Image (cartoon, helix red, strand yellow):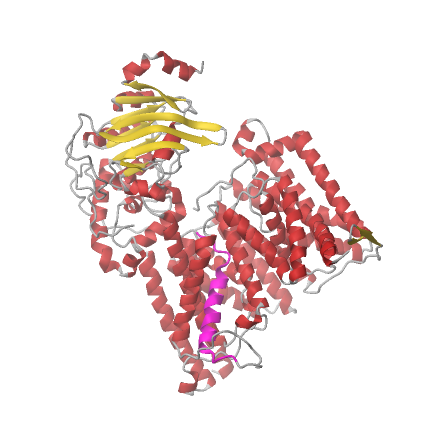
Amino acid sequence: MNTFTLAIGFGLVSSASLLLGAAGFTIQFGVTNIFNLAYGAVMTVGMFVAYLVNVDAGGSIWIALVCGALAGAALSWFLNACVFAPLRRRGVSQWAITVVTFALSWIIGGALLAAAGTLTRTYNQPQYRSVHLLGMILTTEQLAIMGVSVALMVGLHLLLRYTRLGKEMRATAANPELARTCGIRTSRVTSIAWVLAGLLCGAAGVTEAINLGSFDTTTGGTLLLIVIAAAVFGGVGQPYGAMLGALVIGLSTELAALVSPNLKNVIAFAILAATLLVRPNGLIPAPVVVAEAPVQ
Amino acid sequence: MSAAWQYYFITLLVYACVNLIAVWGLNLQFGLGGILNFGYIIFQSAGAYVGAVVALGPAVTGGFQSYILGANLPWPVPLLAGGAAGGLLSLVVGVVALRPRRIDYQGMALLTVGLIMTVIISDYTGLFNGVAGLSDVPKPFGAALNLGFVSYGWFFVGITACLTVLMYFLVRRLSDSPWGRQLRALRENPRALQGLGVHVGSKRLQAFVVGGIFAGVSGALLVEFIGSWSPGAWTLDETFLFFVAVVIGGRGNNLGVAMGTIVTFTVVLEGVQYLPLFSYTSVAEALQIVVIGLAFIFFVAWKPNGLIPERPKRFRGREPAPTPSFAIEDGNPGGETR
Amino acid sequence: MTARAPDRFDIGRIAGAREEVAVALEVVDLKMHFGGVHAVDGASFEVAEGVITGLIGPNGAGKSTVIDVISGFLKPTAGNVIYRDADIAAWPADRVAGAGMVRTFQLSSEFPRLSVMENLLTAMPALRGSTLAGALRGPRHWRRAEADAVARGYGLLERFGLEGRADEYAGELSGGQKRLLEIARAVAAGPRVLLLDEPFAGVNPTLAREVESALAALRADGLTMVLVEHDMGAIERLCEDVIVMADGRVIARGTMAEIAANHEVADAYLGS
């Protein structure tokens, strides 16, 4: 066991929560074609709802995790129903939607700030046992989180590949007009995609807050960039790419932290910038080519 | 009027002018050129930092702040240096970050570049004194004039106002020209413009750099008023407010965005201080963010062209030239290439 | 044929020899493969100067792809595009247009928030003040040239029946008017060859007549055109020469009457 293997361990833990976030982001982008910058705010909301359940109401961290995920799902659904679907119907241009997601992250952040203040918070958790595994030191809680992540990913895989809903989602992602003509109710599929993404988003927020130890209203914003880095690197719109991206980013950030703690986030940003500029379709390009859309 | 009130107005006016210059720059990039520059604030910062280290004397080893340069040059050199810094940084960033064809990817790339810069400047304290930032930046003609606090303030307002008028004429000259028109075409449909023989990439880069110069100038001006600058002064929030000003005012229209700037920065941000309803200022500030955000979404959805929309140029009807046969336009009236 | 202004781009004409039918554009064994999809698979043809050449074929034949390649929006997997004695296959779109080959698009691509007149002005080649340096020199530098361009613009608008709408937002025109505007704009660019990608699609019959007469007038002036269309009536009325494509290749060529009698063409359309 050395610092290197320890870092790998931390990297895997990090990857677990990134995985949830990236998968959610990518599903939502794939189906709706919206690069949602408000995603980070939804993660923060998940964190705070979990706090309410865990600290204020005294529930266990696992119940809090579920509640956080559900809160993310609800908020996500709400945003689609009240903001994005109506805007889409009005035929608002792509720059406008992007800027609206930016505005929403601001609004939600502001509302959170007004409600919760600037204090950093921590969850109420019992001390967990440490496990030594292959040169890594992981607590049983971290192992559990990794397990939850993997389970959710397996569930997602099964959903996308074997259920009718999954097929409809993939069809809508590939070609919305064609999907509509085939009789798929794309507005319903879109709604479900938002809920699913929100669920994963909330879960990602809570698990990341657990990893970090403490959080405040800005945590989601920073996390968002790293999640986006993972999603884009793997191939936006491609859930399996998100898994790869989460692994790569999670490991590289922790390994970079060995060199210098400041490098941790920078490396994620650098990977994100490099991907956007050099290979925007990511490592595993989704069947839908990232299309250009003029401003208007 | 008491000195405190005078100084309040001085601050308001200087900030208004600085914001106007910055917003005109963003209007060139985004309103006219369609570039979603989510990293805009870093170019203003570049101007501020470079302006500061040109105006400051050499860093004292063992002193409380460390930074590069320290040329101790008089005004207007720091201002020019700041503008140049904004432009140069835009050139370097633009060559790389303007490549994505999807506008949201472009925005994301620029945002990320901005974040990377923030981290670099915060961590490498030798550059611009890291997180603590620079302070004690000398004011233009400060020592020479030996004016009182408030009188100097009005003097500064004077030079700022003159500069703002100058920048307005510059931005109008550019926007109203055929170059400006091509930018707007670029915004609407880059592919079609390419098909008409225009090299779209260089036009976009030109708009980006000129906008960057405006940003740099605004930063250099502001830093010499405030006297200090640190990473906390330039976050994503600032960029967002500039976008709000552009969209609400009327993207593409220089007078429109000017109005948007006054409304957003002066009325809304300052106005909230006068509302007696809130006991905790932090809550007021947070709610202010919510209100601005909601107003912004409203405009984007219902009045995307803003309060004073951009209007195409109207040409006085002339006798049409005798119906030309489709003769090849040997039009090189000016002989310029595109 | 109308007299031509001296070439701006002297690529070296074959001195002396003047063929019976001058060739404006030649496509040699063009291939455009997207991974496993062979959109264009060895297409070869010539386009004669001064006539409207039709380019027809069933959906998926590769017609629009050929236009994209010729106009520089796609780089071909293989093959040559000979234009004015140069192989322009690898040229980017702006360079091709600058050399005088301009195209219109299948989907309306006017600049919606610019006025009709402004749309035309963006196309006029080398207008003073279009460069950053020119713009910085101020209105006095470019005012006159722009006024001349505006006059030319009004003339063009008249030819296309849009003169009353010069100051309207291009985005507010009807579908057919947008098509007319796009063609007018392409003509404003001063092309030697005009590539038209389904200009009649989705245009109501009245305006379609106007588009047709506009194209006929352009032909009368000697402009070389390639017309990709599904509207067989228009093709018949406008084109002396028709090329038929299917499965990425040229399968027939001739007048409309000859094409109509060709069994291979019928098969291609019916998808045997």
Question: Foreground residue, A134 or B272?
Answer: A134
Q: Tell me if residue A96 can be seen.
A: no
Question: Foreground residue, B247 or B92?
Answer: B92
Q: Quadrant of residue A157?
A: top right
Q: Where does the image place residue B35, in percent across and percent down from the top left?
A: 44, 52
Q: Residue at x 50, y 48 (%)?
A: A278
Q: Residue at x 16, y 30 (%)?
A: C18
* Count of residue discs: 0
Q: Where does the image place residue A118, in percent across and percent down from the top left?
A: 67, 65
Specify start and end residues of the magenta stretch as a single range. B35-59
Say if the magenta span includes residue A250. Answer: no
In this image, A27 relative to A17: left or right? Answer: left
Q: Quadrant of residue C229?
A: top left
Say if the magenta span includes residue B53. Answer: yes
Q: Residue at x 40, y 54 (%)?
A: B205
Q: Residue at x 39, y 45 (%)?
A: B190
